[in-house]
Amino acid sequence: MISLNFEKSADGLLPAIVQDYRSGEILMLAYINRLAWEKTLETGKAHFWSRSRSKLWLKGESSGHIQIIHDILVDCDEDTVVFKVEQLGNAACHTGHRSCFYRKVENDKFIVQGEKVFDPEQVYGKT
């Protein structure tokens, strides 16, 4: 199995940039450990390590908004990946937006771009 340089990080976590495979839109940034990497390669679905819950996380396991891997790019140091995915459910962000990067900095405030794709209250029971 292809291995990454997990030893480079003190906590064994490497950044995973998630990008729409068609449009190139950046959907989110998450972290992978060795287990998440292996599950992603094994299943073809994006898995991450949840830092807040300290557990393996299949993207979309609660919402149904699964990410199907189309390509994986690895940087020159083997310590960062880009997952090019098909985003099922049309939303990557738990807030209901398509991308986690839905706010633009303009002057001294955030400007929200785009509309929510789903209501997080209905999907998760919270925002």
Image (cartoon, rainbow, N blue to C red):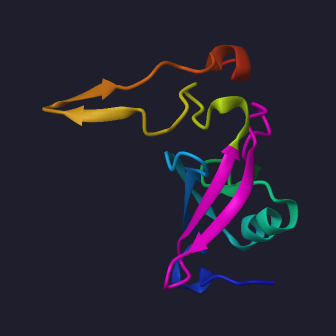
**With 115 as the anchor, is 96 left or right in this view?**
right
**With 4 as the anchor, is 15 left or right in this view?**
left
**Residue occupying image coordinates x 62% and y 16%:** 119
Q: Residue furthest front?
A: 22
Name the quadrant containing residue 31: bottom right
Rendered location of residue 44, percent (x, y): 81, 59
Q: Quadrant of the N terminus?
A: bottom right
Q: Is residue 30 magenta?
A: no
**Residue occupying image coordinates x 51% and y 50%:** 24
**Residue occupying image coordinates x 80% and y 68%:** 41
Q: Is residue 83 magenta?
A: yes
* Magenta highlight range: 59-86
Q: 121 or 29, which lies in front?
A: 29
Q: 85 or 104, which lies in front?
A: 85
**Residue occupying image coordinates x 55% and y 52%:** 19
Rendered location of residue 33, percent (x, y): 67, 69
Q: Residue furthest right?
A: 42
Q: 19 or 104, which lies in front?
A: 19
Residue 93 position (above or below residue 40): above
Residue 51 position (above or below residue 59): below
Rendered location of residue 113, percent (x, y): 38, 26
Rendered location of residue 95, percent (x, y): 55, 27
Name the quadrant containing residue 98: top right
